[in-house]
Amino acid sequence: MEIGQLFLNALVLGASYALVALGFVLVLNATAAVNFAHGDLVMAGGMLAVALSAVLPLDTGVPGLLVLPLVLLAMAGAGLLFSLVAYFPLRRGPPVSVFISTIAVGIMLQHGIKALMGPAEQVAPPLIAGPRLEFAGLVASRQALATLVVAALLIGGTALLLARTQFGRRLRASAQDPEMARAIGVRVPVMIAASFALGTALAGAAGLLFANSYFVSPGSGGNLMIKAYIAVTIGGWGSAPGALAGALMIAFFEVGVAAWLSSPVAEAALYGALLLTLVLRPQGLFGEPAGRRV
Amino acid sequence: MVFAAKSAESRAADPETTACLRKSRATRIGIVPTAAAAALTLWSGALLSGALWTSGARAEAVRLPILAPTSGILALEGASQRDGALLALKHAPKGVTVERLVLDTGSSPQRAVQAFEKAVRGLLPVAISAPIFGPEMLAIMPLAKERKVPLVTISGTAKITELGNPYVFRFFPGDAVVKTAQARYTVENLKRRKVALIYQTTAYGQSGRRHLRANFAKLGAKIVLDEGLSPRVKDMTPVLLKLRRAGADVLVLQLHSGPTALIVKQAVGLKLGLPIVAGSAMHQPSTAALLDPAALKGVCAESGSSPISGGGARMRAFATAFRARFGRAPDAFAAAQYDAVTMVLQAVANGARTAAAVRSALAGGRHDGIAMTYKSDGKGNMAHDAVIVCYDGKTRLPAIVKRYHNVDGAL
């Protein structure tokens, strides 16, 4: 039964990591540059959920679900703003300019939020409130199960958007070959801005999920950024399915290996697996369809 | 167990508190013209030194820089420390004017060294309110010895007073004191002898672990699980399942604030049903705020003091003034740093105007603070008392259930 409990917990953690990694890879594909502020945008989404829960009347059984659409919308707007500040003014410069600017904006976010909300850890409202559920010897909070469902819906919705809509096809075309996309009339800058909006909205949703289950503080973005980077490197640079697989793998290391050995060993083993992947399969588990490593 | 703690807010009508607040308002009104001059001084000072200094009458002022980690892993504790020091400067004895410099050490030894260098530039400070983070202290201690400037800190890391540095004064009970209280309460009061010891893999965690292991061995308790956790760990289920398998009858923690709240929350989720005796992070109001009051039932923590749990009139006045100034409840770290800086300022008021004179006053003096009585044990350990606080599962206000006086016999 312990194995079942660990599997369930790893799945829930992996679902949240997957949202972080998916948002990261969308921007990576659109711009061919790493957004080093992505972890801080996840943190900002969590803090926004905390702030909204303090001002909105949320005496319902689903406080987090009520906050979620607001977080998605606000963070999509923040993504657009982010692209205007940290990407578009520098996109014709050397690639290093963009990732330095994303680092700078990330640090500004950290300090700004710390000034507004203090350095302490905060907790966001659960998606669904209520007592824990028990079945077949497993214990799960409603939040954990809701996390799985919300993450699956957001990831599935993003996949459908990219695969089945004209907008999604334009997004992918802009990411895969901007010159060709421009030649056939796609407004590439608009698609890049939309990628920032979508990726940041997913980051915000991940922030909301993390901020209830694992708390959030102004400094918590850095670690999530590293996790997203590892997920994308292991899964395959620029591959959305690879990022999801990489995110789940991280969670299974953190929960499974920690249960078998210990948490410091699990962390070391994860980095060992990363190195092994880079040596044996540099393109990652799902290849490298687009982009370049920075 | 009786939990008799009253709401701290209900004591706000205390005459001493009211007087303190009235004095604070009067000071604010009277200081307006001085503030304009201070702003000019700040501007010119910043231009000359590149640092953010504030001062009153600059010619007579002494320097007492505040170095605290207000970002990074120890940001929460660092902010408490900084604000305790700032409140002490605000309540400085009559006739003592202090030039202030507040620097963020970023929970990084490297940044702490840079901050120290900035702090000692120019006229030597009479003392430095030094960071709570042990690795930062270890980095700046040799520099303080070289420049002969006393450091007053609340770092719990045992090693800082074990290196024979005469310029270090610790005002929060070190691990030799609080870990003794934590272990004794676990064994003597809770009657638990099969201990699961979970510690952070940071210097703070390792130091506490060393003292807890020694104390449990002395008390005849068995450690059935001894495991370190990185502060980045999100899911605590693996370690919780391990300790259940190991047959532990108590969970003893030496973790930072966030991980402490996380493991308590997840232990409740797994229906672990074991008492938890945590480190000082659990006494902090901001840690308790992360959890439902029901999840806190049966959770205890060691600390130097617990300002929100009550105490004497001076402690209540401190708690009220802290809330009024910073908009949040104080914790033991804020109270201890308040006491540390107050002892320095009283030494200055008594005529100690140089770093050497202040060092002598700290090494040989005795200070009746708001949290406890402080006196050096010859190694710079000034605090020798500890308390155990417990939550009743109904509120987030812990009650002091046990006091340990003069634990190391230094008083």
Image: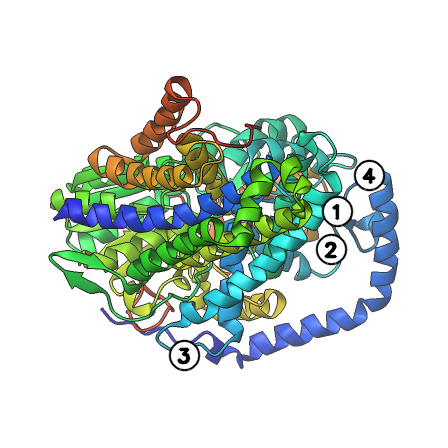
- Give the residue number, with chain letter if any, for mark 2: B96
Disc 3, SS: loop
Rendered residue at 51%/76% (across/down): A56
Quadrant of the image for the N terminus of chain B?
A: bottom left
Tell me if A67 is positioned left or right of B301 in this view. Answer: right
Crowding near pointer 2: few (<14 within 10 Å), some, many (20+)? many
Task: Work out whether mark 1 precedes mark 2 in sequence or the reverse, and give the earlier one.
Answer: 1
Disc 2, SS: loop
Q: Are marks 1 and 2 in contact (CB under 8 Å)?
A: yes
What is the CA distance from the residue labelled 3 to the residue labelled 1? Answer: 53 Å
- Give the residue number, with chain letter if any, for mark 3: A59
Q: Amino acid under label 2?
A: Val
Q: Are marks 4 and 3 in contact (CB under 8 Å)?
A: no
Task: Work out whether mark 4 precedes mark 1 in sequence or the reverse, and give the earlier one.
Answer: 4
Residue sitting nearer the eye, A15 or B187: A15
- Give the residue number, with chain letter if any, for mark 4: B49
Residue A278: percent from the left, percent from the top? 42, 22
Q: Amino acid under label 4?
A: Ser
- Give the residue number, with chain letter if any, for mark 1: B62
